[in-house]
Image (cartoon, rainbow, N blue to C red):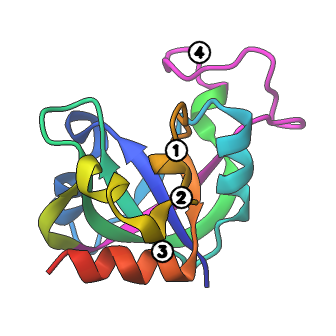
Amino acid sequence: MAYWLVKTEPSECGIDDFAKTPEGVIPWDGVRNYQARNFLAKMQEGDYVFIYHSSCKHIGIAGVVRVVKSAYPDPTQFDPESPYHDPKSTPEKSRWQAVDMQFERKLPRLIPLDQLKAMPKLCDLPLVRKGSRLSVMPVSNREWHHILGQAD
């Protein structure tokens, strides 16, 4: 099992969207960064993922979801009506990946970015590094448990 963090705008697909249908599955699609895509491709069923709210008033880690379907070709890349359409991508040679995720839990409180940056044990986490804008990133076992310990 591995741990991950994905960034999202809560108005687009936040932890509350997952919580509305806890048994439902939400595809994590539309990622158009090669490094983030490569991380999506490594996600496996059963991996846990922090949902990190960004580009909003209250920025930080809001909850946990679980990967329920490993990487598959992102269907939005083939849809000309989608804002994530990629005309260079074909079903035979797709460029982008998606994974399916399901609600696990909301954290008792949002863990804000400022607090995450102040934790010495997170100094290697790409999220807290200056200039890192990656929307999908791995989280080490140690970092995962440290962050969860701060949520209570």
Residue 102 part of the magenta segment: yes
Q: Secondary structure at mark 3?
A: helix
Residue at the spot x=81%, y=17% of the render?
88
Q: Nearer the viewer, mark 3 or mark 4?
A: 3
Measuring from the top left, give residue 15's x and y in whole percent. 23, 57
Q: Amino acid at mark 2?
A: Leu
Asked if the stretch drawn in magenta spans residue 116, the answer is no
Give me the residue at 36% from left, 64% from top: 119
| Rendered-image quadrant of the N terminus | bottom right
Which residue position is annotated with label 4?
A: 80
Q: Amino acid at mark 1?
A: Arg
Q: Give how far apart the Cα atoms at labels 3 and 2 are.
A: 8 Å
In the image, which residues are magenta? 78-105
The residue indicated by pointer 2 is: 125
On screen, 147 above or below 8?
below
Is residue 46 at all visible to an observer of this figure? no
Q: Would you identify the image quadrant in which residue 118 lies? A: bottom left
Q: Is 122 displayed left or right of 61 in the figure?
A: right
Dots 2, 4 in contact, CB < 8 A: no
Looking at marks 2 and 4 on the same chain, the residue that comes earlier in the sequence is marked by: 4
* Number of other residues with Cα within 10 Å of mark 2, as a class: few under 14, some 14 to 19, many 20 or more: some
Dot 4 alpha-carbon crowd within 10 angstroms: few under 14, some 14 to 19, many 20 or more: few
Alpha carbon separation for disc pair 1 and 3: 14 Å
Residue linked to disc 1: 129
Q: Are marks 2 and 1 in contact (CB under 8 Å)?
A: yes
What amino acid is labelled 4 in the image?
A: Pro
Q: Pointers 3 and 2 in contact (CB under 8 A)?
A: yes
CA–CA distance between discs 2 and 4? 36 Å
Read off the residue under disc 3. 143
Q: Position of residue 142 (x, y in %)?
A: 51, 82
